[in-house]
Amino acid sequence: PFRAGFGVGGVPRPLRFLEIGVSEGGSLEFWRDWLGPEAVIVGVDVDQSCRDVVSEDVALVRIGSQDDPRFLRSVVDELGGSVDVVLDDGSHIATHQRVSFNTLWPLLTDGGLYICEDVHTSYWPGYEGGLRRPGTAVEEAKDLVDDMHRRYYTEARSRRPAIPSRPDVWSVSFFDSVIAVHKRSRPDSRRIVRGDETRREQQSDSRS
């Protein structure tokens, strides 16, 4: 939905796109082709050899680790202090994925999208994974689903430990090896009843 830019008040501006993991640069080239010449695209990687794999016409590349909050914040500062889409295709290690998400989510624009790729590593011990192992990308995303429904339960009645509240998680989408989290401020919930209240009360009286 962002190929024409990121909409702010109905007026699109150039998209700010951050990809974690550069490797040979092929993904950055794809995103430039797909998103067009106006998008601002930045790739980050811990490997110094990635610095010059693409031209600046394709993307800016910054060298640093995805589990370094100070580095990540400095990259977003270059983008103007916020980012619209984050694609985590980095180390795929659970700890690194958590640090990146916890650092970048607050810097994600309202209406933006956070995507984590290759989350099948959540099941692989070599990447700090395992079936239903706490702290993996898959389990953290499941917690986000619980958090979206926080208003329907109380922590005292929940069998699980209290989880941090993120009231700006609008949706969590699961695909094979990919998780996408859409950020959007959610208003306080309210119950709306439609229909004839008088008729409802009459039916209640007749039953009693």
Image (cartoon, rainbow, N blue to C red):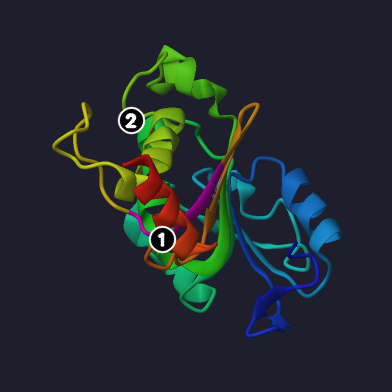
Residue type (three-letter) at the residue carrying disc 2: Gly
Q: Which residue is at a point 54% across and 59% down the rendered structure image?
A: 62
**Residue 99 visible, this orientation:** no
Q: Quadrant of residue 74?
A: bottom left
Q: Classify mark 1: helix, strand or loop.
A: loop
Circle 2 packing at 10 Å, graded few (<14), some (14-19), many (20+), is some
Residue type (three-letter) at the residue carrying disc 1: Arg
Circle 1 packing at 10 Å, graded few (<14), some (14-19), many (20+), is few
* Number of the label disc, if any, that sits on residue 61: none
Please report contact status of discs 1 and 2: CB closer than 8 Å, yes or no. Answer: no
Q: Which residue is at a point 40% across and 31% down the rendered structure image?
A: 94
**Residue 183 visible, this orientation:** yes
Q: Which residue is at a point 47% across and 16% down the rendered structure image?
A: 123
Report x, y in % for residue 198: 45, 64
Direction front: furthest residue:
206
Q: Quadrant of the N terminus?
A: bottom right
Report x, y in % for residue 88: 55, 44
Of the residues under marks 1 and 2, which one precedes in the sequence? 2
Q: Which residue is at a point 79% across and 53% down the rendered structure image?
A: 29
* Magenta residue span: 166-172
Horizontal relation, residue 38 to residue 85: left or right:
right
Q: Quadrant of residue 26?
A: top right
- Kindly identify which residue carries mark 1: 191
- Kindly identify which residue carries mark 2: 135
